[in-house]
Each structure stands twice: as structure tokens, then as C-alpha cells.
């Protein structure tokens, strides 16, 4: 990055604080976010699988695919980090294996979002042909196609030989004559997993929002002669749909746009021949660190987004919680009742023994005494 400084010899004096900030955020991203991803995505799968209405929709196919792939992304990132830094074990063959699995999971997750966005756009633009675009069989076919393409595209990293020579101090580094292939592979991965999907998602959501806005305007013109109380529910439903789409679009942009911009600057520098001053370079380091954290947050916050924007998902979650509470209370009552039934025979046998002792006739020796 020093090549983008106005004065390459002018190293920022505050770079140690930026490195400390990077270490803190990296620890959160590597060790904390996988726990949140496991908890949140497990709850998503539990809610979807236990609710028959949600599980029958094509939307559930995409949600389950994203829940599994998002969890794998962060868990595999943790395992890859441990393989690179752990003093207890290190397998060079796992370096490319973890990268292959991580790239496959990222592609499956990101392109599932693209599928959801395109499907929603087609439904809004062509509402009379909804059965042609939305079906469980079609959704499963698309997910299977994306998974297959992700595996094929990510398999190219398996060709990289890892440098295991004693002179190589850094783990999981490719051999010197393969370094050009390594850089080209990284560029292809960025385009396929970030630049192209982000462009499609933003464009599709803009088309959807424009279509919904035009439909609202036409609805107002058609219903302008009716009573305001009759058209208020329609306005509320339309506004809720727009708000949900707006939340999805904004969250995706918040997660991916900063990472994309900082990645472009890292690879090609500032446009129009501009360069970084020392202070600007320090700010860039902080922004790049935050953008990396935001990118990883995309894989563990879907549960929160569904709870905020999905009314049916919230209802299914609360129903599941109520059922679990009823099950736990009935289990406690059953245990208490079974304990009481177990104590009753003991009390009955004790009282019977006392009654027999009182009514028993004394023997001859006892009467003489």
C-alpha cells in the first residue's frame, strides 16, 4: 500500500494503533462471529423446519441454503486461521482445502441472495406470472445449479501447491512460480463473489422499488374517489413492502459496498492519479478494517433481519417458543405427578403396618407381663 502514498517514504506514525484496531476486529470476526452464526442460523433452520407453512414455500429453500452456507463461511474461516497460526498442528494440504470450501460457501451464500432478489423483482414486475417464477421445485433446482457452479469455480484453487520449504516462514503460501496464478485466482474470486453480485442486487432492487412506487401512484389515482378510510389499509401494506425491500437493499449495501470500494483501492489505487497523504492513509486503514468486519457480519445477522422485516417469521418464532414452554411445563408436571405416585405406595404400606401392630392380639407371655 505504500506505493499509493504521495511520499512512499512517509510511513504513518499512527500505524501501530491501526494495527491494534485490526487485531481486535480480526479477533471478533474470527472467534466471536462464528458463535453468533451458529446460534442465529440454527434458530432460522429450527423455525423454518418446524413451521409447515413456511417450509412449503420457495422462500424457505433459499433461507435454508443461506443459513447453512453462512455458517460454513465463518466456521471454515476459524478453522483456516487455526491451521495457519496454531502451534499444535499444521497440515499444508488443508490450506487449499479450507480456501476451496470457504470460496464455495461464499459463492453459494451470495448468489442465493441474487436469486432471492431476482425472484422478487420478477414477481413485482410481472405479478400475473407469479407461478412461472415461484415454485419449490424451481428454487431447489436453482440452488443445486448454484452449488454445482460454486464447486466448479472454486476447484481451481486446489491446483495451487503450498510452499513447505524450511526457508518459508509464513504458512499456507504458494510456491514462488505459482504466485501469479494465485493473484489471478484472487481477482476472479472477488469479481464472482462481490462485484458482479453486488451490481445485480442493487440494480434489481432499484427496479423493484421503482415498480412498487409506480404501482402506489397508480393505486392513488384509481382510488382517489373512494373514502380515505378504505384506502388506508392498502397504503399500509404497500409501505410495509417498500420498507422491507428498503431494509434488505440498505443492509446489503452497508455490508458490501465499503468492502468493495476499499478492495478496488487496494488493487488499483485511487482514481485520476490521486494519492494518500499520511493522515488519509491512516483513515483508510481504519475504514478497510471496518469494511472487513461488516462483510463478515453479513453471514451472521440474517436472523435479526428476518425478525425485523418478516412478520410471518416472527409469528413462527413466537409460536415455537410458546410450544417449547408448554412442553417444558408439561414435563415438569409429569415428573411431579410421577414422584407423587411413587411416594403414595410407601405411605400406604407404612400406615397399614401401624394399623396391624395396633390391632394384633398380645401373646400369652405379653399378657402375663
Image (tube, rainbow, N blue to C red):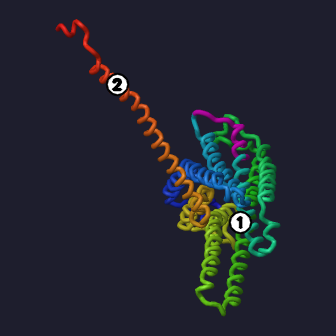
**Residue 329 location, x and y as percent?**
47, 47
Visible residue check, residue 225: yes
The image quadrant of residue 336 is top left
Tell which of 63 and 361 is nearer to you.
Answer: 361
**Residue 59 location, x and y as percent?**
71, 61
What's drawn in magenta, residue-wise?
A: 88-100
- Where is mark 1, residue-wise? 198
**Residue 57 location, x and y as percent?**
72, 60
**Residue 277 location, x and y as percent?**
57, 68
Tell which of 132 and 12 is nearer to you.
Answer: 132
Quick check: is 9 in the magenta stretch? no
Seen at 74% across and 71% down, the residue is 121
- Predominant secondary structure, magenta span: helix
Tell which of 324 and 160 is nearer to you.
Answer: 324
Seen at 75% across and 48% down, the residue is 179
Figure disc tally? 2
Mark linked to residue 352: 2
Mark 1, other Cα within 10 Å: few <14 / some 14–19 / many ≥20: many
Give the mark, 1 or 2, whose residue is nearer the N terminus. Answer: 1
Seen at 57% across and 35% down, the residue is 87
The image quadrant of residue 266 is bottom right
The image quadrant of residue 233 is bottom right
Q: Are marks 1 and 2 in contact (CB under 8 Å)?
A: no
Q: Answer with left or right where residue 1 lies relative to residue 334.
A: right
Seen at 56% across and 54% down, the residue is 320
Q: Answer with left or right where residue 125 lies relative to residue 346.
A: right
Amino acid at each position: 500500500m505504500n506505493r499509493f502514498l504521495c511520499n512512499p517514504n512517509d510511513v504513518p506514525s499512527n500505524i501501530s494503533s491501526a494495527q491494534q484496531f485490526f487485531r481486535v476486529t480480526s479477533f471478533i470476526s474470527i472467534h466471536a462471529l462464528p458463535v453468533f452464526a451458529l446460534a442465529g442460523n440454527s434458530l432460522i433452520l429450527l423455525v423454518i423446519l418446524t413451521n409447515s407453512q413456511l417450509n412449503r414455500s420457495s422462500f424457505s429453500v433459499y433461507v435454508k441454503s443461506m443459513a447453512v452456507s453462512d455458517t460454513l463461511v465463518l466456521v471454515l474461516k476459524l478453522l483456516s486461521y487455526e491451521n495457519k497460526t496454531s502451534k499444535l498442528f499444521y497440515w499444508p494440504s488443508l490450506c487449499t482445502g479450507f480456501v476451496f470450501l470457504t470460496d464455495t460457501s461464499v459463492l453459494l451464500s451470495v448468489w442465493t441472495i441474487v436469486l432471492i432478489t431476482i425472484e422478487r423483482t420478477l414477481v413485482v414486475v410481472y405479478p400475473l406470472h407469479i407461478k412461472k417464477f415461484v415454485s419449490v421445485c424451481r428454487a431447489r433446482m436453482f440452488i443445486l445449479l448454484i452449488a454445482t457452479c460454486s464447486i466448479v469455480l472454486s476447484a481451481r484453487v486446489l491446483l495451487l501447491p503450498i510452499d513447505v520449504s524450511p526457508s518459508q516462514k509464513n504458512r499456507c503460501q504458494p510456491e514462488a512460480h505459482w504466485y501469479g496464478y494465485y493473484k489471478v485466482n484472487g481477482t476472479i474470486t472477488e469479481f464472482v463473489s462481490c462485484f458482479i453480485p453486488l451490481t445485480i442486487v442493487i440494480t434489481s432492487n432499484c427496479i423493484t422499488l421503482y415498480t412498487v412506487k409506480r404501482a402506489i401512484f397508480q393505486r392513488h389515482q384509481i382510488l382517489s374517489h373512494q373514502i380515505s378510510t378504505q384506502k388506508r389499509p392498502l397504503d399500509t401494506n404497500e409501505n410495509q413492502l417498500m420498507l422491507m425491500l428498503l431494509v434488505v437493499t440498505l443492509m446489503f449495501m452497508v455490508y458490501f459496498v465499503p468492502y468493495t470500494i476499499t478492495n478496488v483501492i487496494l488493487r488499483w489505487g485511487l482514481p485520476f492519479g490521486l494519492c494518500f497523504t499520511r493522515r488519509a492513509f491512516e483513515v483508510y486503514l481504519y475504514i478497510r478494517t471496518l469494511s472487513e468486519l461488516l462483510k463478515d457480519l453479513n453471514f451472521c445477522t440474517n436472523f435479526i433481519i428476518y425478525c425485523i422485516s418478516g412478520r410471518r417469521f416472527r409469528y413462527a418464532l413466537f409460536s415455537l417458543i410458546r410450544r417449547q414452554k408448554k412442553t417444558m411445563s408439561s414435563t415438569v408436571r409429569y415428573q411431579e405427578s410421577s414422584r407423587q405416585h411413587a411416594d403414595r405406595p410407601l405411605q400406604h404400606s407404612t400406615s397399614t403396618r401401624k394399623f396391624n401392630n395396633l390391632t394384633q392380639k398380645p401373646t400369652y407371655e405379653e399378657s402375663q407381663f
